[in-house]
Image (tube, grey):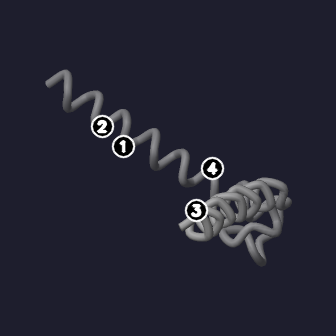
Amino acid sequence: MARGNARELAREKNAKKQQELAKKKAANEKDGNKGLSLEERRRRDAEVMRIKQLKALEAKQAQRA
């Protein structure tokens, strides 16, 4: 029975280690950013933020009406 517990602890430890490694990746190494230059990422992110702001503004206006 103790072996099963050791496996579970090892899985948890490995999952935590993988999360820490993912945090240390540079922005250009992350999956969503592969193949994009810094300027391309900035443009994409700015567009996403504009869309989010518009949706929030529309929701706020709908809430007031």
User: Badge 2 is on which residue?
Assistant: 58
Q: Position of residue 53 (x, y in %)?
A: 46, 39
Give the amino acid at mark 2. Answer: Glu
Decide: is 54 above or below 2.
above
19 or 40: nearer the eye?
19
Q: Is residue 14 left or right of residue 38?
A: left
In the rendered image, the residue lying farthest to the left is 65
Q: Which mark is residue 55?
A: 1
Mark 1 and mark 2: span between their CA atoms?
A: 5 Å
5 or 44: nearer the eye?
5
Local SS, label 1: helix
Q: Position of residue 62 (x, y in %)?
A: 20, 32
Mark 3 or mark 4: which comes first in sequence? 3
Give the amino acid at mark 3. Answer: Asn
Q: Which mark is residue 5?
A: 3
Local SS, label 2: helix
Q: Position of residue 47 (x, y in %)?
A: 57, 54
Marks 1 and 2 in Cβ contact (< 8 Å): yes
Decide: is 29 above or below 57.
below
Q: Which mark is residue 46?
A: 4
Mark 4 and mark 1: span between their CA atoms?
A: 14 Å
- Mark whose residue sits in front, 3 or 4: 3
- Mark whose residue sits in front, 1 or 3: 3
Mark 3 or mark 2: which comes first in sequence? 3
- Residue at left 65%, top 64%? 6
Quadrant in the picture for the C terminus: top left
Give the amino acid at mark 1. Answer: Lys
Mark 3 and mark 2: span between their CA atoms?
A: 51 Å
- Residue at left 82%, top 66%? 28
Q: Is residue 33 left or right of residue 4?
A: right
